[in-house]
């Protein structure tokens, strides 16, 4: 009697081993990335269900008018991010994007501090769909088209 496995059974075993390896690799990747995910919060969500202190998250909303304050060191900013429902104080130390200003949209990446202030490591300024670069702000539509054609 022959102890060799039939070709059909060999293929089945190989497919099952490959499937198990794929599932194992997926679980290993998910486990390795579990703390790397950066969740997005609106101010209302952060007020009602704040993330645990020290967890990397993103906070998105509008920079409230009149809330932007620069510290004496010239690089630390404090401001309020709101969404019409809730407000979150934010502190950022660094160079801000050109489009960052009061009344504009912002996404701040960072962590909630022990005092409840969001400490941002990075700011991403959002602009509306009517954005025009400041170099083209005073141009007519024809001049803007000509400039765009020249830069292609």
Image (tube, rainbow, N blue to C red):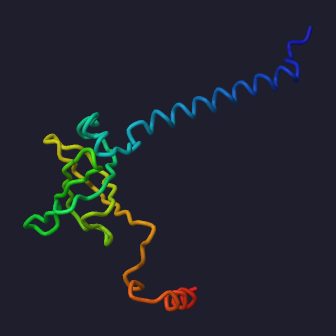
Image quadrant of residue 70? bottom left
Question: In the displayed image of the protein, which residue is found farthest to the right?
Answer: 1
Q: Which image quarter is the N terminus in?
A: top right
Q: Residue at x 83, y 20 (%)?
A: 9
On screen, residue 118 above or below 122? above
Image quadrant of residue 33? top left
Q: Residue at x 69, y 26 (%)?
A: 17
**Residue 79 image point, x, y percent:** 19, 57
**As rendered, which of 21 and 51 lies closer to the eye?**
51
**Residue 98 image point, x, y percent:** 31, 72
Q: Residue at x 31, y 49 (%)?
A: 59
77 left or right, relative to 10: left
Q: Which image quarter is the C terminus in?
A: bottom right
Q: Residue at x 50, y 92 (%)?
A: 143
**Residue 18 image point, x, y percent:** 69, 30
88 left or right, relative to 125: left
């Amino acid at each position: 009697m022959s102890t060799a496995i039939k070709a059909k059974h060999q293929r089945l075993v190989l497919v099952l081993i490959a499937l198990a390896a794929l599932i194992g690799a997926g679980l290993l990747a998910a486990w390795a990335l579990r703390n790397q995910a950066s969740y997005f919060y609106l101010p209302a969500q952060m007020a009602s269900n704040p993330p645990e202190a020290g967890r990397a998250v993103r906070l998105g909303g509008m920079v409230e008018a009149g809330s932007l304050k620069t510290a004496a060191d010239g690089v630390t900013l404090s401001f309020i991010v709101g969404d019409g429902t809730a407000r979150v104080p934010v502190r950022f130390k660094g160079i801000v994007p050109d489009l960052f200003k009061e009344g504009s949209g912002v996404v701040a990446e960072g962590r909630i501090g022990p005092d409840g202030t969001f400490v941002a490591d990075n700011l991403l300024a959002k602009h509306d769909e009517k954005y025009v670069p400041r170099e083209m702000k005073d141009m007519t539509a024809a001049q803007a088209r000509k400039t765009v054609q020249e830069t292609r």
